[in-house]
Image (cartoon, rainbow, N blue to C red):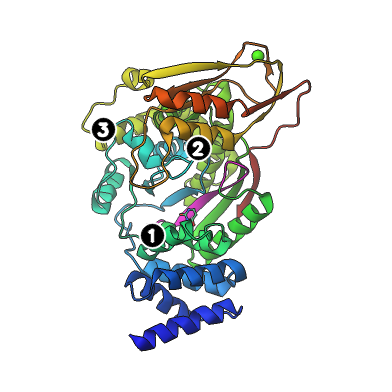
Amino acid sequence: MVEKIINILEIVAKKRDGYELNEKEIFFFIDCVIKNKIKDYQTSAMLMAIFINGMSEKEVFDFTRAMINSGKVLDLSDIPGIKIDKHSTGGIGDTVTLIVAPWVASCGLPVIKMSGRGLGYTGGTIDKLNSINIKTNLSDKQAIGLAKKTGLAIIEQTDEIAVADKKIYELRDVTSTVESLPLIASSIMSKKIATGADGFVLDVKFGNGALIQDLNSALKLANIMILIGKKFKKKIVAIISDMNEPLGSHVGNLLEIQEAIMILKNQVNKNSLRLLKLSYEIASNMLILSGIINDKKSAYELLKNKLENFDAYKKFLDFTKNQSDEIFDYNKIIKKQAKYKLKIYSDKEGFVNKINARTIGQAAFELGAGRTKKSEIIDYEAGIIIKTKINDFIKKREILFEIFCNDNKKIDRAVDILKDAIVLSDKKIKKNKIIYKVIHG
Ligand code: URA
Ligand code: CA
């Protein structure tokens, strides 16, 4: 015991002083973390040393490997074909998974997806599914069975995957060490690789509504993740996308499900076009990585066809049948609403120059759509529909938002926050591209 404490102190000191840790030292550190052989303050000191000094390519690879090793690795070999997964670093109104998973599955690409719950302003796929009573607490064996049967399963990430990450992420959260690029990259990639897919399409977001605010850091993060993926012999593509304005028009768990269903039914609202565009890009790259299709043009054609002939929507219905005790009732789900709703109108006129993702995320959070701790209960029906888009001309008294919640005490504060969410001016502006760059690994 005494010897181990000396060792960990030496390793922390080595990292603190800017030296590269070797494989043995990194594996020892992770082993100490999962077996509770070191104190949280020692782990935290190491995380801060990593935050300050960064990690070499070799260190990031070893760190990721040690994290994967700390838990279970799924074996998807029973599901025929190449399996491609997707991951988003998280944003406001990002409901891409709910659209893309059934969509690519309807093209013949099997998807078995482990997702998380939302934390902070950003929603999680699992909460969204739970808002319409889809069961997500299935075992990985059950999920593999469903993926074999209908080509699609979405379940909660189990605690058995990358066990060290859970502990490390919790400590990062309370020690201001979340924003370290090598720590983010190894955290995401260890969990992804452990879920067993052959390749990944990563949606790396930058902007005020994202974990990473600036474009340069997003590019760096994408490149570290691509490097890790390639070292593990995974097929990999990273899409750098803008998160300065919400991706879709609906923000909130049930609301985002409703927007996804409208898109899957090929009834796309003009305010959902950015969400649709990014979904096309992610889905087409998944299909190309899987080898189902060779080029982007054919991928887009196939995907368009699958929306228009309702195969994508039918796949979503198969999925709800597999993972729910209730018969999915479109009319019921689409009409479901929170007890309180309120329309918010503009008090000025002008062209919409900005729809601030972070502010809208904060307002949705205030309405009850988000949580600060994993254990907190959220209001599934709470959220915001954005009724405009960049460069629309807004007249006085024209509607900007519709807000929803089940606790009317929360409304005033959300309304107050939303006052600053939209910026109008007398000129149109040059729109931010939704997709900034696609990097092929
Ligand atoms: N998401 C993760 O899973 N890990 C991080 O470190 C950041 C975002
Ligand atoms: Ca108008």
| Classed neighbour count for the residue bearing mark 3: other residues with Cα under 10 Å, few (<14), some (14–19), many (≥20) | some
Residue 405 percent coordinates (x, y): 41, 25
Seen at 59% across and 57% down, the residue is 221
Q: What SS does tag 3 mark?
A: helix
Looking at the image, residue 28 lies above or below residue 426: below
The three-letter code of the residue at mark 3 reads Lys
Seen at 26% across and 45% down, the residue is 137
| Classed neighbour count for the residue bearing mark 2: other residues with Cα under 10 Å, few (<14), some (14–19), many (≥20) | many
- Residue highlighted by disc 1: 166
- Is residue 206 a member of the stretch shown in magenta? yes
The three-letter code of the residue at mark 1 reads Lys
Residue 409 percent coordinates (x, y): 41, 25
Q: What SS does tag 2 mark?
A: loop
- Residue highlighted by disc 2: 94
Image: magenta residue range: 194-210
The answer to which image quadrant residue 426 occupies is top right
Residue 391 percent coordinates (x, y): 70, 23
First of labels 3, 1 by sequence position? 1
First of labels 2, 1 by sequence position? 2
Cα distance between the residues tagged 3 and 1: 31 Å
Residue 293 percent coordinates (x, y): 51, 45
The three-letter code of the residue at mark 2 reads Asp
CB of residue at label 1: within 8 Å of ligand 1? Answer: no
- Residue highlighted by disc 3: 321
2 vs 3, front mark: 2
Cα distance between the residues tagged 2 and 1: 23 Å
Query: Where is the N terminus found, in terms of image quarters?
Result: bottom left
Q: Is residue 441 visible?
A: no
